[in-house]
Amino acid sequence: MTLPIDVAALTRWMAEAGLGEGELVDPVLLAGGTQNVLLRFTHRGRAYVLRRPPLHLRANSNETMRREARVLAALAGTAVPHPGLIAACPDETVLGAAFYLMEPIEGFNPTTGLPPLHAGSPAIRHRMGLALVEGIAALGALDYQALGLTGLGRPENFLARQVDRWKAQLASYTELPGWPGPDEIPGVDKVADWLAANCPAQFTPGIIHGDYHLANVMYRFDSGELAAIVDWELTTIGDPLLDLGWLLATWPEGDPPDETAVSVHPWQGFPTAAELVEHYRARSARDLSAIGWYGVLACYKLGIILEGTHARACAGKAPRETGDRLHASTMNLFRRALRWIDAGGRAT
């Protein structure tokens, strides 16, 4: 098997980093994430997972990897389930990109299928939903300054900046030929105007995962508890309630649940969106009176991010099937945002 990693260079670096000399045993590429390279191997009897950016680097790939490593190092010893950081290499010359080594996670991602224990128990699936909320409640409770994460993001005016930031992102897609523009996205201006008019006046800054949903966590094989929160590439300092809003924006609705949400099968037993909010409320001192606003913002932001792939597909720079599928998700996210706005800003 040809690996997208210079194994000899990695072996030398590990020795220099104090991890011991010796060959890498049984290296295997892992599925996970959409772009980054994950390589599991054994070295001197210890299991490792290497994470590095995609082979075709994006503009911010190396900085993103360094940020991830910094966050994982800061989370050590906290109540937040996360992959344990072993060592990090910010130097891009060793493997052609920054990378880090972490502890393997013994667990599964629920969106790829449930083990028999979880598939056979609505009670365990209910616990899975509650544990999901507890993960971000624990993350949002951390003192980012005490953990050495000052400067990771710009919390000043974080909420007030969001609408203009993502409106500009949407407008930038007009540079891609073939994209029909934002007009067919339902309520795109109404949602932006409502968000701007109803922005919460203040918040307490904290750590945000940035892309929190069922596809970015792993569960234990023996229970409904989280094994780890993964994919920390969008982590920043801002308002942690956006993570809860993101969870609401991606939470399946209806019976059966809509297919464009982040779904798990079987779904029966998982908590309702209202139960997620109440479970968070019981575990956080944060004011959830405007949680619907965060849900609408998450729909707006995520919808615009997904529409970017559709725009690139229209320009021939991404698979058309993927672009069409994500465009449908964008449409559903904006319809969901409009329903919540019409319900007086209620997301549950």
Image (cartoon, rainbow, N blue to C red):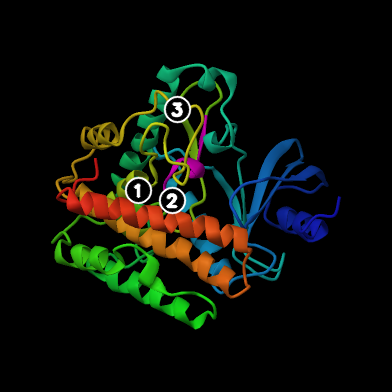
Query: Badges 3 and 2: C-beta atoms under 8 Å apart?
Result: no
For label 2, count other residues whose C-alpha is less than 10 Å away and answer few (under 14), some (14-19) or many (20+): some
Q: Going from the N terminus, do you reach mark 3 or mark 1 first? A: 3
Look at label 1 and name its amino acid: Ala
Which residues are drawn in magenta? 211-219
Splitting the image into 4 quarters, where does residue 135 fall?
top left
Residue at point 19%, 63% (across, down) = 194
Q: Relative to residue 195, is residue 324 drawn left or right?
A: right
Q: Nearer the viewer, mark 3 or mark 1?
A: 1
Q: Which mark is residue 74?
A: 2
Q: Position of residue 346 (x, y in %)?
A: 19, 46
Q: Which residue is mark 3?
A: 225
Q: Is residue 119 above or below residue 86?
A: above
Q: Position of residue 54 (x, y in %)?
A: 65, 62
As rendered, which of 118 and 312 lies closer to the eye?
Answer: 312
Query: Badges 2 and 1: C-beta atoms under 8 Å apart?
Result: no
Residue at point 14%, 46% (across, down) = 289
Look at label 2 and name its amino acid: Ala
What's the distance in space between the residues labelled 3 and 1, CA to CA?
Answer: 22 Å
Q: Is residue 149 visible?
A: no
Q: Position of residue 8 (x, y in %)?
A: 82, 58
